[in-house]
Structures are given as C-alpha cells and as structure tokens.
Image (spheres, grey):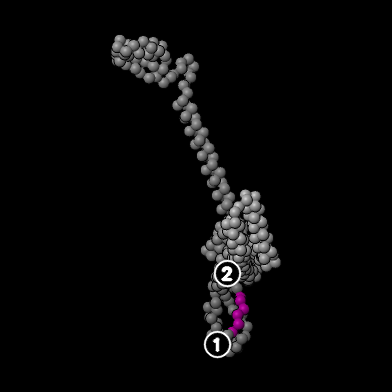
Amino acid sequence: MNIKSITCPNCGAQLNVDENVSRVVCEFCGSTVTVEDSRLEGFNRELGSMNAREKVAYEKAKAIDDLIPPLCDYPRVLQGKNVLENQRKSLSDQVAFCEKYGRIVTYLICCTVSAFFLLLLILIRANILFFIFFSVFSILLFPAFAFAILKYWDNVKLGVETTNNSIAAHAKTLNNFNRILDEHRDVVIPQNYRYPKALCFIRDHLRSQEAQTVEQAIYQYEALLRDEQRLAMQHQQVMMQQQQLDQMRRMQNNMPYAGSSTVYVRQEGHSILLHLFLLFFCGIGLFTIPYYTFSKRHYWHL
C-alpha cells in the first residue's frame, strides 16, 4: 500500500491516505476530500510541460518572424545609407563650389569665349558688321552663362534635399531594425543562417512543433541541406552517365563494328538497270558502275 500526503482544502490539515482511495474524510474537520489519482497528476504535469514547451516554441517562431526583415535587410540598408551619405557629400561640395566660385567661373567663361571670337575676327579681317554682331553676342553671353550656372546650382540643391530625405528614410528603417533586434535579444541566430530560406525554415518548424528550440530547427535545416546536396550530386552523376551513354551511342552509329575476322559496314544499294541506262545514254555509268562494284559500302539490285 502506497501512502501519499494531501492537504485538506477546508482546514488545511495534512492527511496521509492510500493512493488507491478516491475519497477520504478529514479527521480534523470532518469534511470529505477527493483524492486525485497519481497517474492523473503525472498526466497533468506532462500536459502542462508540453503546453509550456509549445508556447515557448510559438513565441520563438513569432520572434523569428519579426527578425526576418532586420537580419536579412540590415546590411543592404546600411550599405545604401553609406552610399547616399557619400553622394550627399559630393553634392554638398558642388553647392559650396557654386556659392564660392560661381560668379568668377561665369566671368572667366565669358571673357575666354569673347577673346577667342575677337581674335578670330581680327585674323580673318572681318568687316564692321561682324564686330557689331560680336558685341551683341558678348553682351548676351554673360546672362546666358549666369542662368545656366544658376540652374545647375538649383538642381544640385534639389539633389541634396532628395538625398537627405533618402538618408532619413534609411536611418528610420535602421532604427526600426535595431528596435526589433533589441526586443528579441534572447533569440540568437548564428550568422551563417541569417538569410530568408534558413530563417523561414526555422520559423515554420518551430511553429509546427517539429522543433522545440532554435538549435533543433537549425540541426533539421542542416540535415535538409545535406539531403539536397546529396540529391544534387546524384542528379549530376546521372546526367554525366547519360552524357557518356549518348556519346557511346553516337560513336557506335558513326564507326564500323570490328569483329574477330569480319568487318561490318553500312551498305547502300543501287539499281543496276538505272546505271546501265545511264551508261548507254549518258555515259555517267562508265564511272559509277566500277566504283559501286568494287566499293564495300555499295551493292547492286534490280
């Protein structure tokens, strides 16, 4: 007889009872106490432990589902942000150059172009009309170049503003990624498995209870990779064997078969009546009849 200790729910006294007894009367307060079967207790404990493991695995799967974008896209977004920062620096340097030397560059270009055309007119000894036209051209040249540089300056400023907006968007995305990573610091994914296929596999196996921990899911994923690699090698071997068989068939079709004493060759038949007709009327048979007669690849028929 196995004795177990239970607590009376009415007075709190400790009672020693037999495990096989379903009910007992408390000797202190007289109330009836139901004795729970030990097997049922063990089942409830195992069920509670199973539910706890399933809950932990589901929480891990949910965390990995949240971690997929940060772990997969973080390097790409960070690299894009660095590229945009370099682009912004280049555009900012161009804006500073336009602010500092824009007017001087305009004067230099106008003076250089005017001096070139003036020298050209002097060399060709142009008349007064060309000099008048050159004077008007020189007057209009400065505002034209000033407008072009101003327009370029505005475009560069717009590029700087657009780049700043893109950098802010990338920084916001990175901050969101950092927040998600900080929230799920307890979920550790090795660097070798931080890509969509591996993360989705780990998440799905945790969610379907095929794995209870991340380590078990990673082990199952490695087994899947080994199976895929083995199947790929088998497929490659089958393809190589098929290529070798095809090559051997082509060689057998193109080459004669050499036996111990007889060589078999593919022969082609010709009509003797047709070639006799060609011999008497055209003279061609004078060449074809001897060749086809002594050649091993040809034979005669009617």
Nearest the viewer among 78 and 223 is 78
Characterize the local packing of mark 1: few (<14), some (14-19) or many (20 or more) Cα atoms within 10 angstroms: some
The residue that mark 2 highlights is 59
Q: What's the residue type where badge 2 is placed?
A: Glu
Residues at badges 1 and 2 in contact (C-beta under 8 Å)? Answer: no
Is 24 rendered above or below residue 65?
below
The image shows residue 132 at horizontal and vertical percentages of: 59, 59
Asked which secondary structure carries label 2, the reply is helix
Asked if the magenta segment contains residue 4, the reply would be: yes
Residue 20 against residue 156 in the figure, above or below: below
Of circles 1 and 2, the one toward us is 2
The image quadrant that residue 214 belongs to is bottom right
Locate residue 182: give its quadrant.
bottom right
Magenta residues (range): 3-8
The one of 202 and 107 positioned closer to us in this rendering: 107
- Asked whether residue 161 is in view, the answer is yes
**Residue at mark 1:** 31
Structural distance between the alpha carbons of marks 1 and 2: 44 Å
Q: Position of residue 273 (x, y in %)?
A: 29, 13
Q: Residue at x 56, y 57 (%)?
A: 197
Horizontal and vertical percent position of residue 287: 38, 12
User: Looking at the picture, which amino acid does disc 1 mark?
Assistant: Ser
For image coordinates 60% across by 82% down, the residue present is: 7
Answer with left or right where residue 261 lies relative to residue 27: left
Quadrant of the frame with the N terminus: bottom right
Magenta region, main secondary structure: strand
Q: Nearer the viewer, residue 161 or 184?
A: 161
